[in-house]
Amino acid sequence: MTQFVKLQVLEFPVSSDVQWAVASPHLTSCLLPARHAFSVREGGVSEGPFASLNLGFATGDVRARVNENLRRFASALNVPPGSLITVSQVHGDRLLEATAPQDGDEVPPPLGEADGVWTRTAGLAVGVKTADCVPILISDAAGRCVAAVHSGWRGTDLRISARAVETLAVQGVEPASLVAAIGPCIGACCYEVSEELAFRFERAFGAEVVRRDRPKPHLDLPRAVRLTLVAAGVRPDRIDVLDACTACDPARFFSHRRDRGISGRHLSAIVAGK
């Protein structure tokens, strides 16, 4: 069972018994060597269905509130807002490189259309937004080359997490040396899918990614992502999975499916070290 402890900073040693922690109040993995955070609902200024730390503009929320929430998230990561780089997500398998921060006290516009972003520029943070899809943060062993990946069912089917591993391998990072953390997302408990999609995933990833103990099939996206990472060369003991379903926990998480599209967005980000 996942355990949680209160911590004051966002850097943690590797631990075999406590993999995840709550900090500031974001979630972090004890396996990742780079500074990072998976946001939760707490700590923001948004109201109504977006309360309180909505980090997405394309939701109907007040822009000034989202900007303030983003500034708070950047502060928790200990980076200037201009150093928090995101992408315009399109449910594909493309990754972009972030190379430089921008001036100003607001988070820059998205770098471009992609579902992953990586960097080796020290002090730069890369992130992806989710509200049920799978966020994945990846780092080399030194925390110097990092990536953030958004993986919905389409991106998972396209194996975008493997594309991220391949991208870092081109930079000279051996897949077996990578560390990955799979963050909060909709779990198999709540992700009911069509028979057609279930069969598609069973054929691509194996029967274990679909639960058939209910009237309709349920898809286990985090398991499919983990299988993809292992197949790409990441060691199983270097992959952390947070066993938390966004749809099950309205107090802590936004959920696009649970809230029928009227929901905030989480941001999962990781900072490249020196």
Image (cartoon, helix red, strand yellow):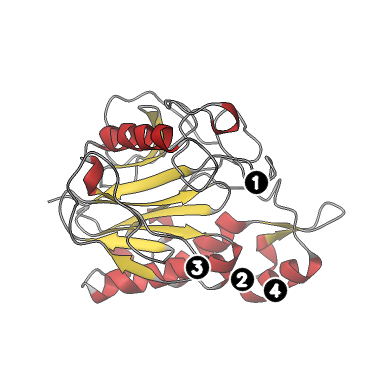
Q: Where is residue 46 in the image (x, y as percent from the top left)?
A: 48, 29
Separation of marks 3 and 2 at Cα, in angstroms: 8 Å
Could you tell me residue 248's position as x and y percent? Answer: 66, 37
Tell me the mark number nearer the camera, choosing from 4 and 3. Answer: 4
Give the mark nearer the N terminus: 3 vs 2. 2
Counting from the top left corner in percent of width and height, residue 170 is at 25, 76
Q: Do the residues labelled 2 and 1 touch (CB within 8 Å)?
A: no
Q: Residue at label 4?
A: 200
Give the residue number, with chain letter if any, for mark 2: 205
Residue receiving disc 3: 228
Q: How far apart are marks 4 and 3 (CA)?
A: 15 Å
Q: Which of marks 4 and 2 is in front?
A: 4
Estimate how packed mark 4 is, as few (under 14), some (14 to 19) or many (20 or more) residues with alpha carbons within 10 Å: few
Circles 3 and 2, Cβ within 8 Å, touching? The answer is yes
Q: Quadrant of residue 9?
A: top left
Residue at x 26%, y 47% (from the top left corner):
33
Q: Identify residue type, mark 1.
A: Gly
Q: Earlier in the sequence, mark 4 or mark 2?
A: 4
N-terminal label among 3 and 1:
3
Please indicate whether residue 119 sits to the left or right of residue 228 in the image: left
Mark 2: few/some/many CA within 10 Å (<14, 14-19, 20+): some
Asked whether residue 32 appears in the rendered view, the answer is no
